[in-house]
Amino acid sequence: MGQIDLFSLQQTYNQQRILLCFNGPLTQSLIEEIGHALRNYMEREHATPSSAMDVFGAYIELTQNIRHYAARKGWDASAAAAAATVVIARDTEGRYVVSAGNILEAADGPALETRVNALAAMDKVQLKAQYKEQLRKPREEGATTGAGLGLIDLARKAAEPLSCSLRTLDDGRAFFSLRVVM
């Protein structure tokens, strides 16, 4: 591998208003360290406490979901399959954009994409009702997935509908990306 053109990379980050970017395997300690850096950055930027909490909450929800998915699949935390890409940026209106993507089994992608798109199609009243309904549902003992409240809560707090993409890879897997504007 040749030398990385850091200047071009910096220019790209600046053009896309990227504040923080991580690419690689996510461990619990790494999620915490990046979260700490994110909090410090937002304090220096004088973000409102509610805005800072929303962005931090979105970051934690997305990264923990990625980490839990890899663990459920039995993927080694250091394996490329357990890797993620996380980007926190500002849009042209000054809102924070939290994006995260990870590899998943191709068969798991469509259901997740459908779930996100269904939430994106709901208005705030419908999202609140969906949240309450999900809260009341009994949780199956030994369930391997969460109750889904985190994703619904992200949709409720987001400044615009959630958006996602699913890209099929050659090895029977896919790359799923989720974007949340706060």
Image (cartoon, rainbow, N blue to C red):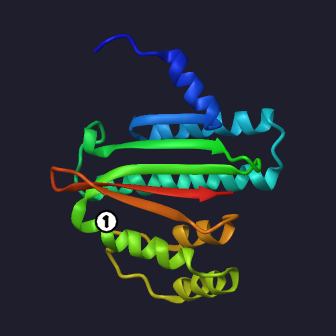
Between 144 and 116, the one nearer to me in the picture? 116
The answer to whether 117 appears left or right of 180 in the picture is left
Label 1: which secondary element = helix
Image quarter where the C terminus lies is bottom right
| Residue furthest out toward the left | 171
Residue 65: image x %, image y %? 43, 57
Three-letter residue code for mark 1? Gly
Residue, x 43% and y 42% (percent of image)? 85
Neighbor class of circle 1 (other Cα within 10 Å; few <14, some 14-19, many 20+) is: many
Q: Which residue is drawn at the image coordinates 51% and 24% (left, top)?
A: 9
**Residue 178 point in image, percent of width and height:** 48, 57
Q: Position of residue 95 (x, y in %)?
A: 73, 51
Q: Nearer the viewer, residue 162 or 152?
A: 162
Relative height, residue 78 to residue 161 (above, below): above
* Residue 147 in view here: no
Residue drawn 53% across and 76% down?
119
Q: Which residue is mark 1?
A: 109
